[in-house]
Amino acid sequence: MQDAIPKRFYSLDAMRGLAAIVVVISHWPQFFFSTEKFPALHPLYRDTSYISTYTATRLPFSNALFVCYNSGWLAVDLFFGLSGFIFYWLYSTKLKNSSITTWEFFVARFSRLYPLHLLTLLLIVCIQLFSQYAAGTSFFFYNHNSYFQFFLHLLLISSWGIGDHVSFNLPIWSVSVEVALYAMFFILCRFLPIRNAVLLFVSAIGLFFVFRFNTQMGHGIFSFFLGGYTYRIYTWLVSNSRTKAVLPYLFALSAIMWTAAIIATYHRGNMLESAPFFWRFTPLPAVLLFQLTILTLAVAETRRGTLGRRISMLGDISYSVYLLHFPIQLSILTAAIYFGINREVFYSHYFFFGFFTLVLTTSMISHYYFERPVQRVLRQTWGNKP
């Protein structure tokens, strides 16, 4: 039977949603924010001195979720890799053949990303102003909330090295990087041949910036275009009908690498503080594991027809989960301080379930009753194709 690329990768949608949840779990210690130690925060989360003393072993489901608590920030690199794979799948040929215009590409991306970004930005402004009143101190967590930073956030360029991205709704930093990646992707597809050498060269540039400057943009460039290279490997396997032959080996290698990564993280303890240089300052091992996982799932879904369809809706709401969790978290913490609620509640398993129920429910409402309707209106108004 001739292999065929699926019309939708449900498994990759599901993985994107799970990655968003992992990021939220990694941000759980922010519930123990200390106004006394404010505002020390390293841009890449390696410095946790802005958080008051808390017992890591008492965090909800700490034994089961230790990888998420210790290394969950790496899921952002998974986002970038998934974006690279998906964008080269959906857009690279269309852009190369000019079957999609610059305006159509811009409208498609703007209508998907900007409405919720603007909403959460305004929410954070309101909540931060109230949090100042509630705690009688500076802004919580991210205090560089100047008019200039607000302007950068409005333009989605807060992580382009112009200002201090540690401000307002910080998770938007990766979306800001993705906007730059979309522009690079568009230019490369339009004006350069879509070749493996080009993708690897651009990825190497990103990795250089990770090693040399440890910049967010470097992380994005490295993972995104390596994701494009992974897609090229996938299409080669499909076109040569090799998916059936390689799938067992991909599964075995993925299982071995994930097991090794989990064991290494467990023995290393808090990776953000005690990891060796190679793991702390470059996402290379994790990114390679992510790319292998993406390839394995894509090949498996090609063979099966569908994979992970029942939980693929997590991918639909992943953007909402990613952007809304901090405003919700900040609102809860502000209320706890204002009403004098003991922070012991944040160790509770029941509170953990309640929080994620709230985040997921709010995200579903946002996706189906705000994001999609606004996206549809913008595309119809600006004459974009369905």
Image (cartoon, rainbow, N blue to C red):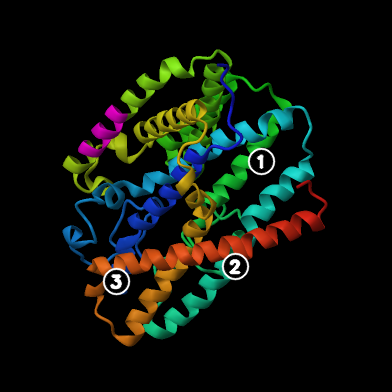
Which one is nearer the viewer's eye here, 352 or 241?
241
Residue 149 in sight here: no
For the point 21% across and 55% down, the residue is 62
Q: Which residue is mark 3?
A: 34
**What is the C-alpha distance between the residues marked 2 and 3?**
27 Å
**What is the C-alpha distance between the residues marked 1 and 2?**
23 Å
Residue 293 appears at what percent x and percent y? 41, 32
| Looking at the image, residue 284 lies above or below residue 196 | below
Residue 183 is labelled as: 1
Of marks 2 and 3, which one's residue comes earlier in the chain? 3
Tell me the kind of residue under disc 2.
Leu
Instruction: List the single residue furthest toward the front.
Output: 1
Tell me the kind of residue under disc 3.
Ser
Q: Residues within 10 Å of mark 2 (few under 14, many from 20)?
A: few
Residue 143 appears at what percent x and percent y? 44, 68
| Looking at the image, residue 181 lies above or below residue 289 | below
Of marks 3 and 1, which one's residue comes earlier in the chain? 3
Tell me the kind of residue under disc 1.
Ala
Q: Over which residues does the magenta segment extend?
A: 255-263
In reply to whether residue 256 is colored magenta, the answer given is yes
